[in-house]
Image (tube, coloured by chain):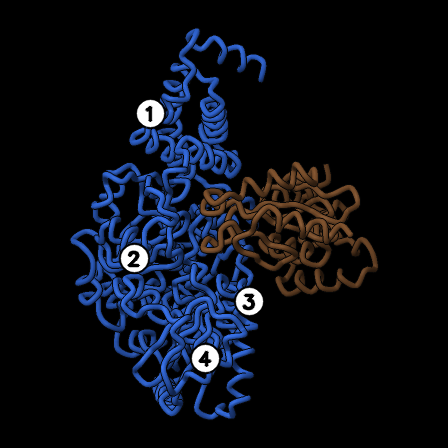
């Protein structure tokens, strides 16, 4: 597709949309889909036909609208007005269609001034819930592939890297490494063949941002990867996606096919000499594959075990070639940065963390779902305002960020701004964006054991500190919960945390003590309450010998 | 020890599903790095990976059987045992855990004597766990034969098992 054809398609699709009086969008991302939103869409379609209004009302499937707890969600766009409905059932279809020219259906309507919607800043999710993820022209109508065209016609690869550097974008997968710096390293690495890999192995339990982006706006990720490939000089790319995300896989496959057919991927992209192909690689359920060297091993068809770095993948990655690995959300930020300029992006967020971050809110919170907020927003704003607080009149206790590599942040620190460095100071990490809210009924030692159990079974077994250390820490936590541990067991646990942290080979091991350390830091009394101080741990000794 | 074989062997049976597997192998040019893709196809077609299928894949991709076995056992997604007629996957992600996924597992153990990876003696129901389905807003989430169900309670899951066992 040449730039002219792209503009033509964009204008045609926009025209078609403005010709339509009402547009009914039904969320068909995984959350709403498992509440049978596909049947709901059929029911609305039927109701529209029944009313004979198919010429002026379009019914379409869109991606995630964010407020997953209110699913299935429907939004109705009439000109510039938009009405949002929650918990819509197929039985409501008739009433909904009838209401199109009159007053909205009050009983299903989401209040439009809800902080959940008004307090967000959308960059990554700007198309989610607006476009049909299965239609290329819908993406193009929202300036899709405009950034790629701009880069290919007006910018050199160095210009693209410069723009990304100016933006201050940092990796959204958890590490927070400056994206522009990574790109320039790969670009400078000598080698004829280079690769771009998209890490879509969203392994943190309680995180579903990447799934949602892939299901709601797959072309956005492809465009980001193509821009990266152009910038670093790669001609092949892989998306490593979890096998547990069947809908995301199906939509990615379709998007790749569409882009290839339209000449936006493949040889001579946009009529230029730039060529880039993308292939999918399915994960098979191994958390450690989120680590970049393990991920590369898995793409090569091997067991996903990490190797020591350096050399970093930027120098020697997939099949020994320089490889750029970024996470889904990072790639999703690229097209808007190239389109609007790095300065625009850098104007959002804080001094050290630019742009926005997508978070998955889950656990004991009223508005579970997906949110995108500017960096530097306070945790309180997220939990109490956007998230709508803790349900059932319970008391908020802690928020867990960063999954098994992160930690729990208690109520006293709720006013801290959310950015890479402050979360680190609090003993947690930004992570990929999972936020699990816990209320007073959650037992923090149990939470620590839950994550340790996770790390223990996900440890790949390559290095001893992680393989043996996580097992031993899990045993100690189990002992503490059973009330059989002596004070010296707690000391041993603390010592082990330090050893595993300092001596493990990869991030999985190094960060596995974090949930224990952060709960010890803020909730040590919960550990102490469970210690057996009678008889100086004699029972504990007996129990452990018996167990062995 | 069986090392990589010189001549690729024929499929273990004349089951038509092997055609699908062979097509995947051909599409990937029988490259050794397509091992995980091929294993996915075998599991999709047959439900699990048995010894003959692992040997077949090893010979086709010219890989040592030990390597194929190593990969098949390394990843949780691959099943080495046949599954029951129906499968129930309980999500054990953080959100589901906080909202009581362990109670669902306890119910399965107590009322159906099922643990993670187990199948009822009549071969009707298999119970599995997942790390996270990404359906955290529906916690606790369960997958019944491929369909995700949200906000599942113990009675509901029990009723579904009873229905399957009929």
Name the tint of chain A in the rendering.
blue
Q: CA distance from mark 2 to mark 4?
A: 27 Å
Q: Which mark is residue A96?
A: 4
Q: Chain of mark 2?
A: A
Question: Quadrant where the N terminus of chain A lies?
Answer: bottom left
Q: Residue at x 34, y 74 (%)?
A: A148
Position of B6 with respect to B99 (left or right) is right
Q: Which chain is brown?
A: B
Q: Would you place residue A253 above or below residue A524 in this image?
A: below
Give whichever of A380, B59 is nearer the camera: A380
Residue A195 visible, this orientation:
no
Cβ–Cβ under 8 Å for marks 2 and 1: no
Which residue corresponds to mark 3?
A: A36
Secondary element at image label 2? helix
Q: CA distance from mark 3 to mark 2?
A: 26 Å
Where residue A103 appears, as percent x and y from the top left, is 36, 82
Q: Which mark is residue A525?
A: 1
Q: Would you place residue A236 above or below residue A537 in this image?
A: below
Q: Which mark is residue A386?
A: 2
């Amino acid at each position: 597709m040449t730039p002219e054809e792209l503009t033509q398609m964009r204008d045609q699709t926009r025209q078609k949309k403005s010709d339509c009086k009402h547009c009914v969008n039904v969320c068909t991302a995984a959350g709403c889909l498992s509440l049978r939103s596909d049947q709901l869409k059929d029911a609305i379609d039927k109701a529209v036909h029944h009313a004979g209004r198919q010429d002026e009302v379009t019914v379409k499937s869109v991606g995630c609208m964010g407020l997953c707890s209110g699913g299935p969600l429907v939004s109705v766009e009439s000109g510039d007005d938009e009405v949002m409905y929650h918990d819509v059932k197929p039985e409501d279809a008739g009433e909904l269609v009838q209401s199109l020219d009159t007053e909205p259906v009050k009983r299903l309507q989401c209040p439009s001034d809800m902080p959940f919607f008004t307090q967000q800043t959308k960059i990554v999710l700007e198309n989610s819930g607006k476009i049909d993820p299965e239609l290329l022209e819908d993406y193009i109508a929202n300036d899709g592939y405009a950034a790629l065209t701009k880069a290919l016609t007006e910018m050199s690869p160095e210009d693209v890297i410069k723009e990304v550097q100016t933006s201050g974008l940092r990796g959204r997968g958890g590490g927070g490494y400056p994206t522009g710096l990574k790109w320039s390293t790969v670009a400078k690495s000598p080698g004829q063949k280079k690769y771009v890999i998209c890490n879509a192995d969203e392994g943190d339990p309680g995180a579903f941002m990447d799934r949602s982006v892939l299901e709601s706006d797959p072309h956005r990720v492809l465009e980001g990867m193509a821009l990266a490939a152009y910038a670093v000089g790669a001609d092949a790319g892989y998306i490593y996606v979890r096998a547990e995300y069947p809908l995301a896989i199906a939509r990615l496959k379709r998007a790749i096919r569409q882009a290839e057919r339209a000449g936006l991927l493949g040889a001579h992209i946009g009529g230029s000499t730039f060529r880039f192909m993308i292939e999918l690689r399915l994960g098979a359920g191994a958390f450690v594959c989120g680590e970049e060297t393990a991920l590369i091993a898995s793409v090569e068809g091997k067991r996903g075990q990490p190797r020591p770095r350096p050399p970093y993948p930027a120098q020697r990655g997939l099949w020994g070639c320089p490889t750029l690995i970024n996470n889904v959300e990072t790639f999703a930020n690229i097209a808007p940065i190239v389109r609007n300029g790095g300065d625009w992006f850098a104007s959002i967020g804080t001094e050290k963390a630019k742009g926005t971050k997508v978070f998955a809110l889950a656990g004991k919170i009223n508005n579970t779902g997906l949110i995108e907020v500017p960096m530097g927003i306070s945790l309180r704003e997220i939990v109490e305002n956007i998230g709508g607080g803790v349900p059932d009149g319970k008391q908020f206790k802690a928020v867990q960020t960063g999954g098994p590599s992160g930690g729990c942040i208690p109520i006293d620190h709720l006013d801290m701004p959310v950015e890479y460095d402050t979360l680190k100071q609090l003993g947690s990490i930004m992570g990929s964006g999972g936020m699990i809210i816990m209320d007073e009924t959650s037992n923090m030692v149990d939470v620590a054991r839950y994550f340790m159990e996770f790390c223990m079974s996900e440890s790949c077994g390559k290095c001893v500190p992680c393989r043996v250390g996580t097992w031993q820490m899990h045993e100690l936590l189990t002992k503490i919960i059973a009330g059989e541990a002596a004070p010296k067991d707690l000391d041993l646990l603390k010592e082990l945390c330090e050893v595993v942290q300092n001596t493990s080979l990869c991030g999985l091991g190094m960060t596995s003590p974090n949930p224990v350390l952060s709960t010890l830091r803020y909730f040590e009394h919960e550990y102490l309450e469970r210690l057996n101080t009678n008889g100086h741990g004699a029972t504990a000794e007996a129990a452990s010998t018996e167990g062995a | 020890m069986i090392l990589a074989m010189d001549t690729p062997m024929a499929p273990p049976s004349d089951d038509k599903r092997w055609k699908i597997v062979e097509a995947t192998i051909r599409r990937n040019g029988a490259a050794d790095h397509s091992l995980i893709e091929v294993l996915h196809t075998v599991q999709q077609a047959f439900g699990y990976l048995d010894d003959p299928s692992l040997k077949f894949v090893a010979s086709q991709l010219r890989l040592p059987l030990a390597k194929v076995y190593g990969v098949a056992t390394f990843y949780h997604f691959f099943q080495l045992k046949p599954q029951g007629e129906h499968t129930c996957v309980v999500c054990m992600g953080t959100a589901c855990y906080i909202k009581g996924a362990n109670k669902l597992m306890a119910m399965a153990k107590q009322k159906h004597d099922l643990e993670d990876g187990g199948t009822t003696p009549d071969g009707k129901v298999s119970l599995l766990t997942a790390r996270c389905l990404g359906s955290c807003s529906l916690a606790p989430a369960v997958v019944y034969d491929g369909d995700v169900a949200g906000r599942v309670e113990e009675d509901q899951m029990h009723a579904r098992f009873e229905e399957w066992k009929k």
